[in-house]
Image (cartoon, rainbow, N blue to C red):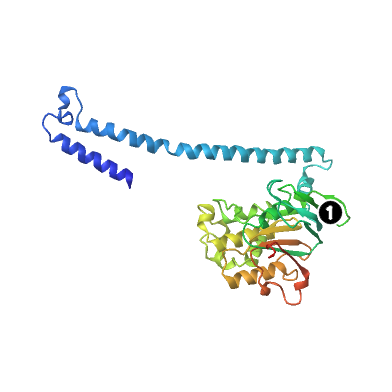
Amino acid sequence: SLGASLIAACVIGIGLASGVSGSLAGVSSTTGLLTPMVLGVLILLPLSSFESTAPLTEAGIQLERSRQSAARVMALVDGARRIGEDSAVGDAAIDDVAVHAAPATLRLDALRWGWSDAAVLGPEAGVTATLTPGARMAVVGPSGIGKSTLLLTMAGLLDARGGLVTAADEAGQQLTIRSATCYFAEEAHIFSTSLEENLRVARGDVTVEEMHAALAEVGLADWVAELPDGLGTELTGGAESLSGGQRRRLLLARALLHRAPIVLLDEPTEHLDAADAERLLARILDPSSGMFAPDRTVVVVTHQLPATALHPGRAESVRVVDLSPVAH
């Protein structure tokens, strides 16, 4: 490396200078002048200072990221406090207000989406759909077309650029989008803690039996059985301790454990081999498979929807939104 080369050059230079009679480096320390050791320290000091200060740039970037994250977290905390203060039934009902666990209907009315008004995505007429309890929707299209952005808008995490996204309970009462949906990002965070705690991210009161059932549903039962401490095994390094496929399956297990009636999944079968991906996608999109409760609505984003992923005889029950550009 460059650092090793510089150090080697300094050492060689000091050695050569020490052998030259009358050179500065060869002067004895008894004269009070530089010795080879002192000269070496002076040469290496700038290198060591660069090494010690180099992380400060990344620290500054991380500080700003953490500051922004803290602001978003505190906004949620303050919102939860307001819910608690306004509730007349005590703390026990706060979770029920925050997450609507009963079946719900999601409606898209001429919806268009995007990160700014200058770059609006979706067809000119928007996307219109009514997803009743138990409905399945697949959003397909090439990378960069806006599938994930649509999912973020459906989750209430981005404002719509046109049209509306609304949710209602079975009695027709309006619900907040965030209380009725759970969004699972393609690269959602895996924490450097136990497998059990990573599953509790979805629901704090989940039981061990429910965890094992969810992991079995997504095909991780054998993997868990081989772990040294089972659910208590530490995932050291977070996502780095898992393969891409294991990470996707673990995130899907979180979705199974969440209480929200409307589940939004971003590329849940990415990094799985083709055969496993097709089988898993078919089960996700089949209300009768038992993976998700039959009254839960599931929306899946995927690059491509294989014909085999649509359950035989039930293809008509899956609403497909194809965002691929139309050839002219």
Q: Is residue 51 visible?
A: yes
Q: Is residue 24 left or right of residue 46?
A: left
Check disc 1: other Cα within 10 Å, few if <14, some if 14-19, many if 20+. some
Q: Is residue 317 above or below residue 143?
A: below
Residue at image point 75% right, 38% down:
81
Could you say where residue 92 lies in the image, as x and y percent from the top left? 78, 46
Could you say where residue 36 lies in the image, as x and y percent from the top left? 20, 32
Query: In the figure, residue 252 lies in which quadrant?
Result: bottom right
Asked whether 90 or 277 is in front, the reply is 277
Q: Quadrant of the C terminus?
A: bottom right
Q: Is residue 290 visible?
A: no
Q: Is residue 302 left or right of residue 45?
A: right
Q: Which residue has dot 1 on it?
A: 168
Query: In the figure, residue 64 lies in which quadrant?
Result: top right
- Residue reaching furthest front? 328
Q: Is residue 277 above or below residue 120?
A: below
Residue at image point 34% right, 37% down:
47
**SS class, disc 1:** strand
How many numbered circles are shown?
1
Residue at image point 73% right, 62% down:
298
Could you say where residue 281 lies in the image, as x and y percent from the top left? 66, 68
Asked whether 263 or 291 is in front, the reply is 263
Could you say where residue 308 lies in the image, as x and y percent from the top left? 67, 75
Residue at image point 85% right, 50% down:
174
